[in-house]
């Protein structure tokens, strides 16, 4: 099981009832044997360029744990899902995450010493 980051751009017209397309994305992930560890809705944002004649999209970020064969299944399914304009599924960088945590710990220790 590997850790991945999934960012999904959902059609802006579905912002009113966002739970329906999100449930569909969650079902795709769990159906492929994955588990969602964190979910963060970044809200509706302007796109850098038009995608399917749309200027805006609702960004949703997820941390997921997936078996080895799941990323291909999820990618194939998200490619044909009408609610999803674009998605990005990348494997998490362990070294980068550890370095970021260490930097945060050092910063918090420095602020405690200054007090």
Image (cartoon, rainbow, N blue to C red):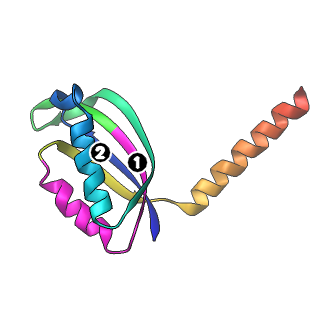
- Mark 1–mark 2 Cα distance, whole angstroms, equals 8 Å
Using the rendered view, name the quadrant where residue 34 is placed: bottom left
Quadrant into which the N terminus falls: bottom left
Q: Earlier in the sequence, mark 1 or mark 2?
A: 2
Whether pointer 1 and pointer 2 mark residues with C-beta atoms closer than 8 Å, the reply is yes
Q: As rendered, which of 55 and 71 lies closer to the eye? A: 71
Do we see residue 56 in this rendering?
no
Q: Which residue is mark 2?
A: 8
Q: Give how far across and how far down residue 88 sits, in percent.
A: 31, 52
Q: Which residue is mark 1?
A: 62
Q: Residue at x 25, y 61 (%)?
A: 74
Query: Left or right: where does residue 12 sit relative to residue 59?
Result: left
Q: As rendered, which of 94 and 26 lies closer to the eye? A: 26
Quadrant into which the C terminus falls: top right
Q: Residue at x 29, y 45 (%)?
A: 8
Using the rendered view, name the quadrant where residue 36 is placed: bottom left
* Residue 38: assigned label: none
Query: Left or right: where does residue 61 sit relative to residue 46?
Result: right
Which region of the structure is painted magenta? Answer: 60-81
Check disc 1 and report its element: helix, strand or loop: strand
- Please say whether residue 68 is one of the residues in the magenta stretch: yes
Check disc 2 and report its element: helix, strand or loop: strand
């Amino acid at each position: 099981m590997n850790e991945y980051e999934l960012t999904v751009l959902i059609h802006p017209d579905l912002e009113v009832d966002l739970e329906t397309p999100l449930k569909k994305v969650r079902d795709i992930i769990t159906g492929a044997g994955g588990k969602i560890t964190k979910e963060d809705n970044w809200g509706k944002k302007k796109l850098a360029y038009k995608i399917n004649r749309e200027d805006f999209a609702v960004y949703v970020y997820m941390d997921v744990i997936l078996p080895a064969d799941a990323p291909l299944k999820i990618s194939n399914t998200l490619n044909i899902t009408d609610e999803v304009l674009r998605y990005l599924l990348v494997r998490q960088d362990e070294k980068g995450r550890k370095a970021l945590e260490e930097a945060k710990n050092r910063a918090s220790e420095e602020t405690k010493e200054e007090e």
